[in-house]
Amino acid sequence: MTFPSVEEVCKSPAFPTVIWKLQPHQSGLLPVAADRGGPLNISWEVHGEGPIKLILVGGIGLTKADWQRQTTYFGHERGDRFSVLVFDNRGAGESDKPVMRYSTSEMARDLLEVLDHLGWLTRGTMVGGMIAQEVAMLVPERIASLNLHCTTAKMGRLGALFPRSLESEIRSTANGCFPQEWLEAPDDAELPTESTPRCDMPAGGYKMFESNYARFAAQEIHMRRSKNGFLLQAVAGGFHHKTPEQLKHLADRVGRERIMVLHGMADRMIPLDQGKKLMEWLKPDKSYVIEGLGHAPIHQRARWFNELLEERCFLGETQGSGNGTSPL
């Protein structure tokens, strides 16, 4: 299959509808890092008003809209049960992009300031990768369930992360994140409908693309990721490093029964052996190595991933304070 060009994707009738107009229940720009080289503004949204707190922590280059399949599922279709926090890390989306040294630990501290601002001081379910590891190191007592997917304790290489032209960047990212057969397959997104709570509908409704690749490319084109911010985040990821001893300490304090690690066998961004090392060092209660899964289950297997996270949320809620720690 020959993938469509950027120009062809932009001409698709579905292109204007690729980013869903999900209306948050709360949103804002929060100045953070005043005593850490800032202040700088972090853009955040909370979707849903339920008692179960779910924190979606984006990786390198991700923005709030990247999580729209999860935001819809938890914060809109199940918004009476869940409150979902999505945010743009420094260097991405609508957050500030100061030219300075970024690190995953500083980005974790940015998130903690947002959580404090929201008053989310009790346990919540956290989903992410390197930054989520850092948050768990800093405040293990505030983690109801830690869910790490397609991540590593140490990146080890930077080359594949650096952006190029938009066309080559999208194709390279797609090939690194997804199996070829999924990219070629018809668009499998579950679109919002008139019955989706707090979602504005465009004229004619949300539309399907010809392929999963076309939808992914359209989303990347719409978001126009900042090259400077991306590079600074990539450097932060490249220098992320957690030792086996640090990860053992993290698991001891969070509680292994609260931790899940998931990695795809088709992940070409972060090789499977790095995911297996993370599993070996954390010894989580749940480890999944999934055949045919690439780097981004939030897109490739959204329904399955959402249902898995829902189970993890309920598990975290039913396990109490556990392991000698208690909510703040």
Image (cartoon, rainbow, N blue to C red):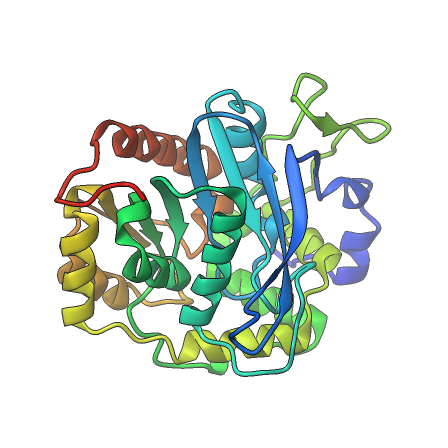
Query: How many numbered marks, from 0 up?
Result: 0
Q: Is residue 161 left or right of residue 294?
A: right
Residue 307 in the image: above or below residue 43: above
Q: Is residue 184 left or right of residue 252?
A: right
Question: Residue drawn 16% across and 70% down?
Answer: 244
Q: Specify the quadrant that holds the C terminus.
A: top left
Question: Residue drawn 48% across and 50% down?
Answer: 116
Q: Specify the quadrant that holds the N terminus.
A: bottom right
Residue 300 lies, in percent from the top left, at 48, 45
* Residue 184 can be seen in this image: no
Q: Nearer the viewer, residue 312 or 179?
A: 312
* Residue 48 can be seen in this image: yes
Residue 94 lies, in percent from the top left, at 70, 58
Question: Residue drawn 50% across and 57% down?
Answer: 113
* Image-quadrant location for residue 314: top left
* Image-quadrant location for residue 247: bottom left
Residue 203 in the image: above or below residue 3: above
Residue 279 lies, in percent from the top left, at 19, 58
Residue 253 in the image: above or below residue 281: above
Question: Residue drawn 14% across and 70% down?
Answer: 245
Q: Is residue 308 left or right of residue 257?
A: right
Q: Nearer the viewer, residue 65 or 121?
A: 121
Residue 63 lies, in percent from the top left, at 60, 55
Q: Nearer the viewer, residue 269 or 72?
A: 72
